[in-house]
Amino acid sequence: MIRIKELLEFIYGKAGAEKILPPLAELLEQFKRERGPAEGAPRIPAVTHRDALLICYGDMLSAPAETGKGETALGRLERFLAELDRGSFTFLHLLPFHPYSSDDGFSVIDYRKVDPRLGDWDDIEKLGRRFKMTFDFVINHGSVQSGWFRRFLAGEAKYRNWYLTRSEHYDWSKVVRPRTHPLLTPFEKSDGSKTWVWTTFSADQADYDFSCPEMLLEFIGIFLDYIRRGGRMLRLDAIAYLWKEDGSPCLHHPKTHAVVKLLRAIVDCLGLPALILTETNVPHTENISYFGDGGNEAHLVYNFALPPLVLHAAVSGDAGPLRKWAAALPALPGGNCFLNFLASHDGVGLTPARGLVEDAAFAQTIEEAQKRGALVSLKSTAAGPVPYELNCSWADAVAPESLGPPETQARAFLATYAAALAMPGLPAVYFHSWVGSRGWKEGPALLGYNRAINREKPAVDRLERELTAGGSFRSLVLRGFEKLLAFRSAESAFDPASPCRVLESEGGIFALLRGPDSAGENVLCAVNFSPGEGKIDSPVLGEIVLPGRSVRWIAFGYKGIRRELSL
């Protein structure tokens, strides 16, 4: 509790800490009483080479024309995964499954309920028997249609300070903005007065005021509730914006870091079987600051620079920026690792690539991606709106149908994921990448936002037919993932702590040497992003030839080559 007390004093001062510490201590004691005596060492789920994470919505799949009796959306997902996932994934990131009012779940109305349109807690518990569950901890903001916000507008004493407000004429010119809409949104209170509420992401999402200690206490209770419900990884959504201070950028505030460290201290203090993952879509050096000092903050951090760099390599055929960046990645403290992903429920963040790719070259990549169907979302800056995110299906961006037959398209697509899967860390695959989805072109017009292009919820029977159609792009991608993930899980050289060396190469070649581990086992992972043949001189194995847009993984040790994979 000493570490927890120190962090509370940093956040709220001594007087504020003394106010919140007794109810927090009781909350933690209650959790311990419910759990009973701890058995042995804390069972925090260590990430190994056998782990991979699948990202999806609870209602990812629409019902078929003839719906099974009593089948919930979560039940439908569970059945689909039981049939199609052949042991590839150990973690399941279930995107927000609460009642919500917008943003496909990220405008939460009630954190302690499951949206009845999806199912109930029993459905989530059933998924938890197969996967280590990852839950979204949407801590920065919530729905203006929630009971909390209604009580705030009604002036109820408990909720009076739960939301961040400023005057109508507040100068927010120094505040870093991830969107282009006004920062403050007016609302009418029950007494007829008007209040201006801080809304970082949309007018439907009101930011909480964590200068109110009771607000933090409420969310710590939710945090513990998630772990009671089987959460084995908690994803801190938009955490970088949490703490606001007038006159500052309101991004990466020291007290934001202190809140993350506080949650980590609670995990460590109670020996909770859970990992903390931070979601901070910002330039690389800012992003990795959430590991903290000596790894005392998040267990995992999104590797946000990876998607735009791989996208650039795949579109331009130049893997140089990716090689240079990967070679400079720091060694992480034990127990910490990156979450390596390419596509997600959001778009491809462009900001993390700032300074890593030459501006003119990256602009050409963005232009080409737009020709392939990608949309561009903007954010406000002092210089005016600038591109913030590329919204697209990953398949359309890196493996358009114009490349040739489905086999050629699938090789180009899987080459990008082979690069991500080879990197040190926990690999994460978005559902629509796993099943080889193209962009939902009608989505943005139907739903009114660009991100809808990669958030289609297809009918489960149609998707199953397309995945089992021999030679289809979907089936080739699904089987390719199975091969890559099976190979990866069999090789300890892919452990997050295993050494990683970026090999010297040119053009579109990206090659890593993973290992050796204690048994002297190594894996050479080579990808050719360019359309033409490429070569690499590798240690021990000598010259390796890679056809255009292809993958070659070779596992070898003291006794020679053990297995190979070519795509």
Image (cartoon, helix red, strand yellow):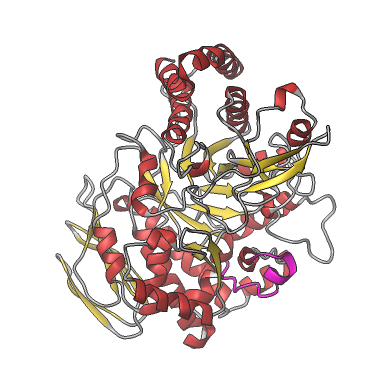
Q: Quadrant of residue 292?
A: top left
| Left or right: 281 in relation to 129 | left
Residue 279 coordinates in the image, percent (x, y): 49, 47
Read off the magenta span: 435-449
At a point 47% along the width and 38% down the height, the residue shown is 276
The reply to whether residue 248 is in sight is yes
Of residues 11 and 540, the one nearer the viewer is 11
**Secondary structure of the magenta portion, mostly?**
loop
Residue 498 coordinates in the image, percent (x, y): 27, 48
Q: Residue 119 magenta-drawn?
A: no
At a point 73% along the width and 22% down the height, the residue shown is 157
Q: Residue 443 magenta-drawn?
A: yes
Q: Quadrant of residue 25?
A: top right
Q: How many marks?
A: 0
Residue 325 coordinates in the image, percent (x, y): 28, 60
Residue 56 coordinates in the image, percent (x, y): 61, 55
Of residues 98 and 540, the one nearer the viewer is 98
| Left or right: 375 in relation to 146 | left
Image: 262 above or below 444: above
